[in-house]
Amino acid sequence: MKNQKDSKQNNVNRPSPLRGDRGGLLSRLLRPNIVSLKPYSSARDEFSGADAMFFDANENPFNAPYNRYPDPYQSELKKKIGEIKGVAPENIFLGNGSDEAIDLLFRAFCIPGKDNVVSIDPTYGMYQVAADINDVEVRKVLLKQDFELDVPGLLNTADENTKMIFICSPNNPTANVFREEDMLKVISGFDGIVVVDEAYIDFAPEKTLMHKLADHPNLVILQTFSKAWGVAAIRLGMAFASKEIIDVLSKIKYPYNVNLLTQEKALEFLENAQQKDDWVSVILREKERLKKALQQNPLIKKIYPSDANFLLVVVDEPQKIYDLLVQKKLIIRDRSKVAMCEGCLRITIGTPEENDKLIETLKELS
Ligand code: PMP
């Protein structure tokens, strides 16, 4: 914990979250304690700059550059990400994985024990976990039989205490992107925050909603470095939204939430976006190859269309196939207990050699 004595209460560097709050959206939705919160002001908030001697943060003066606290706002990294994504740095929040942004959104908007969120079902399990940690009810709305959004279902399930609607596109585990017009109906028809988690969007880049950000002050888009960029280990997630929402997330995050090693590594990988694109091409090619091979396998009853880097397949005995593959040290995900996913196994696309091994082993099991 930071010593409160270190905290400068009249923070001049951090903007007020509610300045420019169009239509009072945020003043209405945010928890009152978050609106009035005086954030911790770090030494690097008060002064930053390279050409100075720092006697202000009780750091060790030796062992540069690791002795110094990192940039709390990751300015260089946001500038670079902004260039690549075509958004201003002020519209970007960076966190310890997109999971951090999910948790912060709950903490910013949902009063524990009172407010609720609406989520599609089935979907990524972390929305439920973050809600449980924050004592917030999740109202689940099943996807339609074809895995498309039930737009009226989502909108009608929201009540006056619903602060957020969670959509994941491409969705985990169903692997499909939702129709843009359906997502826009939810965003326009709901007067709270709509979170669209695009963790897998690099595998279907033309389907992103990023171009709609400016039109919709209630839209938050999540993306991550954990999938296509190939750096899940460095823990770096992104949230894109209005400046007002980003300011709120920045105000409530831990001051140095993205460490120096992560910021440096991310900058290094961003210099080589071509590598990411090459990986995505190989993964997409391998997805088609794996799909064709699985279609030939009598164990596989159905393969759902996929806009992501994984396939959702239906088998008769999911647990048995999962266990047999584990014995061969091939680990897939049994999703058969998940809503609407009876008999389903989720298979992440591996390297060509790994996929060969999986195809061969499943053939032997059939
Ligand atoms: N969103 C979705 C839909 C995911 O499937 C995952 C990881 N499985 C995440 C977010 C987590 O991303 P991160 O590693 O950035 O926390």
Image (tube, rainbow, N blue to C red):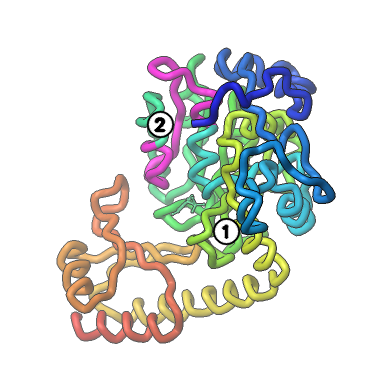
State how many labels appear.
2
Q: Which mark is residue 330?
A: none
Q: Nearer the viewer, residue 132 or 221?
A: 132
Q: Report the span colored magenta.
A: 105-129
Q: Nearer the viewer, residue 278 or 74?
A: 74
Residue at which label 2 appears: 131
Does the magenta-highlighted stretch encompass residue 67? no
Does the magenta-highlighted stretch encompass residue 119? yes
Quadrant location of the C terminus in the rendered image: bottom left
Label 1 lies in ligand 1 vicinity (Cβ under 8 Å): yes
Residue 365: percent from the left, percent from the top?
19, 80
- Image height of 111 relative to 41, above or below: above
- Type of amino acid under label 1: Phe
Mark yes or no: residue 139 visible.
no
Residue 325: percent from the left, percent from the top?
22, 74
- Image height of 304 relative to 52, above or below: below
| SS at circle 1 | loop
Residue at image x 69%, y 35%?
43
Residue 311: percent from the left, percent from the top?
41, 66
Q: Nearer the viewer, residue 241 or 210?
A: 241
Residue at which label 1 appears: 225
- Image height of 225 relative to 366, above or below: above
